[in-house]
Image (cartoon, helix red, strand yellow):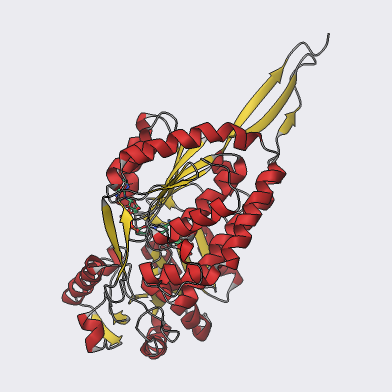
């Protein structure tokens, strides 16, 4: 079915306590490229989420008591299975989310790299001894898993966003209850099937699927046996869920929305900047949290850069992600197309101009949720495209005068996730990197994400870090031990 080699990877129920649970009530998953029905998935809610949390709680102490090397071994087996089934996982991902197959393959490898990274970190959860203030004491610090983790993730990276949380959680000795987006549950369920095959103990990793995200979310943010909630999604939803977590003083990680500036100084290598922008903007048809959202170009190179960019964008092929030549797949749904269209219309009415665009075929206009890659010039930081996360293949070009102007405009946003700039001046590289109010800054580079790096934002883009040596801290509690009477 659906061209899979291993049809058992297409699961349709929730994965709770090591078992597949199905319900008569179902919801549809459809291909955004053509509306094809892919599967009817069990529509679970609060009851299933509660059962998953209880199972995770029962499993957590035994999982944490395993030697870290044993947890690491199981995680690596999970990693190996993901790569062994990379093609099927990528195909499922493209079918339900729409991104080109090559990008989907990349997402599977990216997700697996977090499992590998944290299988290696699992055996390096060190504590401290602290010089005591008096001879009768010894001071120690140990780190312990926070407990049961609830997780909710978005549709744009349906494999990697969930795995990027599960890997450190399980490595730390926590257990995990995930709710994927109902637009794209198949990828999460396939990962759960691989977890079952490698022998993750029952209850350690659970996936609950359903359309009543609020009901499931209430359990994952407020159940007494939930210790930590980790969310990736929009800032609006993150804010709601953070408030729900506050009632029970849950630990949280929030990976939220972005509005990335991409700054091209007049001393930049323009061809390198074009290459970097094409990567930073058009990945997943512009539907990533770190996509460049506002492109600031210094006046002296504005026209030359705009001309080069228009040529590069005109080469982009739009189509079904399963077609190897496709570079730009569909957006996730009709509402996403309408949102991008509205932002472009508003900005044009506010004075922007359309420099270039790619034509959609009659079929693409009739079926699927396609939006043509588009370049707009004469945009200002006050226009709708600059004030909102576009989440589509649209590039607004905004001119700037000098370094101070670029920094001021780039920082004029409530978001603070990723920022990019191109300059060959080492003094400018340090001045601008330090002045930008973002959690991540890429210099002369368009792709900054990898498992070794601390991924996360500041301001309305959230808190916490995923990946890197810092990533485990989000799933560990620090315990201070004070040993007295040591002089007797
Ligand atoms: N910072 C990051 O790492 C990162 C990564 C990917 C996406 N994002 C952000 O996610 C957004 C796009 O994803 P989206 O449209 O799916 O976001 P969204 O916030 O609408 O949905 C995210 C998840 O939250 C669930 N959800 C929605 N409302 C809920 C509620 N009231 N209670 C519980 N769960 C609820 C959804 O079902 C989905 O699983 C963009 O803003 C993007 O920037 C951020
Ligand atoms: O959309 C958000 C993802 O975190 C993007 S990335 O693949 O991690 O760069």
Quarter of the render that holds ligand 1: bottom left
Q: Going by the picture, which residue comes out furthest to the right? A: 488
Percent of width and height locating residue 108: 52, 66
Q: Does residue 197 appear to the left or right of 255 in the view shown?
A: right
Q: Of 182 and 259, which appears nearest the observer?
A: 182
Q: Is residue 278 visible?
A: yes
Counting the numbered discs, the total is 0
Which of the image's four quarters has the C terminus?
Answer: top right
Q: Going by the picture, which residue comes out furthest to the left? A: 349
Q: Is residue 15 above or below residue 52?
A: below
Q: Does residue 404 appear to the left or right of 123 in the view shown?
A: left
Q: Is residue 452 visible?
A: no
Percent of width and height locating residue 368: 26, 76
Q: Of 65 and 435, which appears nearest the observer?
A: 65
Residue occupying image coordinates x 35% and y 47%: 238
Q: Of 26 and 372, which appears nearest the observer?
A: 26
Q: Does residue 57 appear to the left or right of 296 in the view shown?
A: right
Q: Is residue 334 above or below residue 239?
A: below
Residue occupying image coordinates x 78% and y 13%: 136
Which of the image's four quarters has the N terminus?
Answer: bottom left
Percent of width and height locating residue 145: 58, 36
Q: Of 120 and 280, which appears nearest the observer?
A: 120
Q: Going by the picture, which residue comes out furthest to the top? A: 488
Q: Is residue 32 above or below residue 485?
A: below
Q: Is residue 460 above or below residue 338?
A: above
Percent of width and height locating residue 332: 31, 68
**Res. 77 image quadrant:** bottom right
């Amino acid at each position: 079915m659906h061209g899979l080699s291993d049809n058992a990877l297409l699961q349709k129920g929730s994965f709770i306590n090591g078992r597949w649970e199905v319900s008569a009530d179902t919801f549809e998953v459809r291909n955004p490229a053509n509306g094809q029905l892919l599967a009817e998935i069990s529509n679970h809610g609060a009851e299933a989420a509660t059962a998953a949390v209880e199972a995770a709680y029962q499993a957590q102490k035994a999982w944490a008591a395993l030697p870290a090397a044993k947890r690491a071994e199981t995680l690596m087996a999970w990693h190996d299975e993901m790569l062994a089934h990379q093609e099927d996982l990528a195909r499922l991902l493209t079918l339900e989310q729409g991104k080109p197959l090559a990008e989907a393959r990349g997402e599977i490898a990216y997700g697996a790299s977090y499992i590998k990274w944290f299988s290696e970190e699992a055996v390096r959860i060190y504590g401290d001894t602290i010089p005591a203030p008096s001879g009768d004491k010894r001071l120690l610090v140990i780190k312990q898993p926070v407990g049961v983790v609830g997780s909710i993730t978005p549709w744009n990276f349906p494999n990697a966003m969930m795995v990027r949380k599960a890997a450190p959680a399980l490595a730390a000795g926590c257990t995990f209850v995930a709710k994927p987006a109902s637009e794209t549950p198949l990828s999460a369920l396939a990962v759960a099937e691989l977890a079952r095959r490698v022998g993750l103990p029952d209850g350690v990793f659970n996936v609950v699927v359903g359309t009543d995200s609020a009901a499931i979310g209430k359990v994952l943010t407020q159940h007494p046996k939930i210790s930590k909630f980790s969310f990736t999604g929009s800032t609006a939803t993150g804010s709601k869920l953070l408030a729900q977590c506050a009632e029970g003083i849950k630990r949280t990680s929030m990976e939220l929305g972005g509005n990335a500036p991409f700054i091209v100084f007049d001393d930049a290598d323009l061809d390198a900047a074009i290459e970097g922008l094409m990567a930073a903007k058009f990945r997943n048809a512009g539907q990533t949290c770190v996509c460049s959202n506002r492109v600031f170009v210094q006046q002296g190179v504005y026209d030359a850069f705009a001309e080069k960019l228009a040529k590069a964008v005109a080469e982009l092929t739009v189509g079904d992600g399963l077609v190897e030549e496709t570079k730009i797949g569909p957006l996730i749904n009709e509402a996403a197309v309408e949102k991008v269209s509205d932002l472009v219309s508003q900005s044009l009415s506010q004075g922007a101009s359309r420099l270039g665009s790619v034509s959609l075929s009659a079929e693409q206009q009739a079926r699927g949720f396609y939006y043509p890659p588009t370049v707009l010039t004469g945009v200002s930081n006050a226009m709708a495209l600059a004030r909102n996360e576009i989440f589509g293949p649209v590039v607004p070009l905004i001119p700037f005068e000098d370094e101070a102007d670029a920094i001021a405009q780039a920082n004029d946003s409530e978001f603070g996730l990723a920022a990019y700039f191109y300059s060959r001046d080492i003094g400018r590289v340090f001045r601008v990197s330090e002045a930008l109010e973002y959690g991540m800054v890429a210099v002369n580079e368009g792709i900054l994400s990898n498992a070794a790096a601390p991924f996360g934002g500041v301001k309305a883009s959230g808190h916490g870090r995923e990946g890197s040596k810092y990533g485990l801290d989000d799933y560990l509690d620090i315990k201070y031990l004070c040993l007295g009477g040591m002089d007797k």
